[in-house]
Amino acid sequence: MTDQTHLFIPVEKNDKKLSRGTRRQKGLPDAVSGWLLSLPLALVLLFFLVLPIAMIVVVSFWGATEFSIYPAFLFDNYEFLLTSPVTYQVFLNTVKYALITWAITLVLGFTVAYFLAFHVRSLTWQIVLFLLCTIPFWTSNIIRMISWIPFLGRNGIANSTLISMGVIDEPLEWLLFSDFSVILAFVHLYTLFMVVPIFNTMMRIDKSLIEAAYDNGASGFQTLTNVIIPLTKPGIMIGSIFVVTLVMGDFITVRFMSGSQKANVGRLISNDIALLQYPSAAATAVILLVTVILVIAILLRFVDIRKEL
Amino acid sequence: MATPLDLELVAATKQYGETVAVDALDHKFVAGSYSCLLGPSGCGKSSTLRMIAGHESVSSGDILLAGSNITDLPPARRGTAMMFQNYALFPHLSVIDNVAFSQKMKGVDKPVRLKKARELLELVDMDAYAERLPSQLSGGQQQRVALARALITEPTVLLLDEPLSALDPFLRIRMRLELKRLQRELNISFIHVTHSQDEALALADDIIVMNGGKIEQAGPPQVVFNTPATEFVARFIGGHNVLKQQGKPIALRADRLLVNKSAESESTLLSAIVKDVEYLGSSVNLALDAGGAGELTAALTDDAFFNDPIEIGTTVFLTWKPEDAHELAA
């Protein structure tokens, strides 16, 4: 085997020499053109990502009174945040929402993607059904959220149907403005973010691998756990990152679906901003950012998603 | 070995909707033989193999192995194992875990199954690569692993779906020898699907030439090559001219077509114009235009050709011995 590759080496060497020679003639050294090529993206990232974050970090150290904010280097905001039991409750609640939503969207997303990738045989139907999944995205998040309210309300469709069917005697109180309705809305909004990457990785699995597993005596469940899930891991991880970051950064869903009765970190920040307490909001944002980055770092420990990109 | 482990197809048919891919195939694959299913793409050879493997349902008819009907059994319980065209190794598992996969599915203990997998890897000369991932191996190495993974199930029949088509020509010839050696050593039946007549002639004890879902001819390689039964076989197996003699089609091997520069005797049967000369090393092929008899090929040994070279455009006179002409079924 080595003998054959050996045959081609001299040709390749010649090629390299040739191309290098022509590049020399044009003038710019490789290093300079490399830096120039990466400059536009670097500038965009600098102005729209690095600077805003730096600004938030700077402001998080500023001081504030009831009616003014002033530049300073104080740890007051962090001290207040990290010593207040409310902060911990709210962070805990945020993590709870993220975990439960993640678990449900994972099961739903995996099932939907599995169905699309392995049970629907024709590509046309796969595309049709996949587009069907995206139709809800034609309306805005908030409208889709609000549409749950008449459905879940005290005298809403769900309750009146259940009463007329005789399943319950009194309207269920926990359907709306509760953790249930918040998580329901999250799942509704974000399941597709789980479906898409998982479906994508599943479509790349060679169908003959499934046959090979079957040929080697694996049952359907064994094929799922020994072949499909390990090969779908990168997609699962990408979907998980989407869902976890979206849920942890959200504030509007929690506000609408809990009727302002539940809190998460996003609402904490939005309340501070409403009260013009920018330094405090910035400090909360920094802590949230650190938390989310930590969660993602832990997720990335499990899977090398670079293979996917 | 009380019952012979023959594999038998009885009117095995595969239909996809209206189209018939495999049309009532009857064939007996003798135990311990190397059989090649040969044919152009779309002739039904792969469908036949997949039906034997159990990856394709049989529309009607039966498949028998060692006297029992395996038509509706799942792949793993048939006594067959399949080697896939692209090898289908699990990319997330190391070489040894790939080979041990079927044992793991059966619930065999880890040390036992790894030991067995290592034995199989030794058989195909890949034990040095046990810990690698499939993506770190060359095509030929991946194929050996796929072979080991199929053989660990101790099949009665090993099914190979175009196993050599993904390899480069040098490696193809080497793996060809290896496959034949393995088959001899293990003494199990191999059924090998290919569209390459060279491969089939080199490997097979039994060639089954298929066309349009039917068997055109089945038999030992010499028989198929020397006495093709139909015009299709003669053309597909190559090295043959198909002519009409007294209104009947005959096949004539290209190297049995005798070429003379002058019409010296009355034995001359045809005249033709030389259209092209192809030098192939040990032989030289002449492309001939014989007018009404169509395009013909004559294969000359290089000695014969270079002793008396023939220019393009010359008219030559063709003859052959009557016993070299084989009548074909119409």
Image (cartoon, helix red, strand yellow):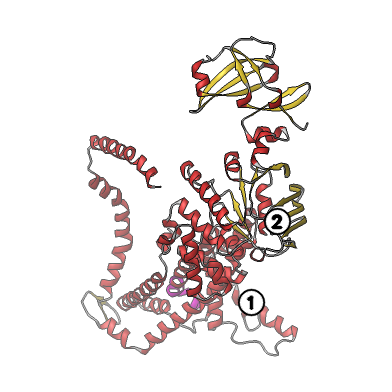
Question: Residue A249 in magenta?
Answer: yes
Between A231 and A163, the residue placed more toward the observer is A231
Where is residue B216? Give x, y as percent: 72, 40
Between B119 and A19, the residue placed more toward the observer is B119
Q: Which residue is mark 1?
A: A151
- Return the chain for callout 1: A
- A181 relative to B248, above or below: below
The C terminus of chain B lies in quadrant: top right
Q: Which residue is mark 2?
A: B7
Where is residue B232? Give x, y as percent: 70, 34
In front: mark 2 or mark 1?
A: 2
Disc number at residue A192?
A: none
Residue at 25% from the left image edge and 76% from the top image edge:
A62
Residue at 23% from the left image edge and 41% from the top image edge:
A28
> Which residue is most to the left?
A73
- B109 relative to A49, above or below: below
* Left or right, B239 with reference to A88: right
- Write the start and end of the magenta stretch as one range: A245-256
Residue at 56% from the left image edge and 75% from the top image edge:
B107
Between A120 and A209, the residue placed more toward the observer is A209
Secondary structure at numbered mark 2: strand
- Return the chain for callout 2: B
The N terminus of chain B lies in quadrant: bottom right
* Residue type, mark 2 in image: Leu
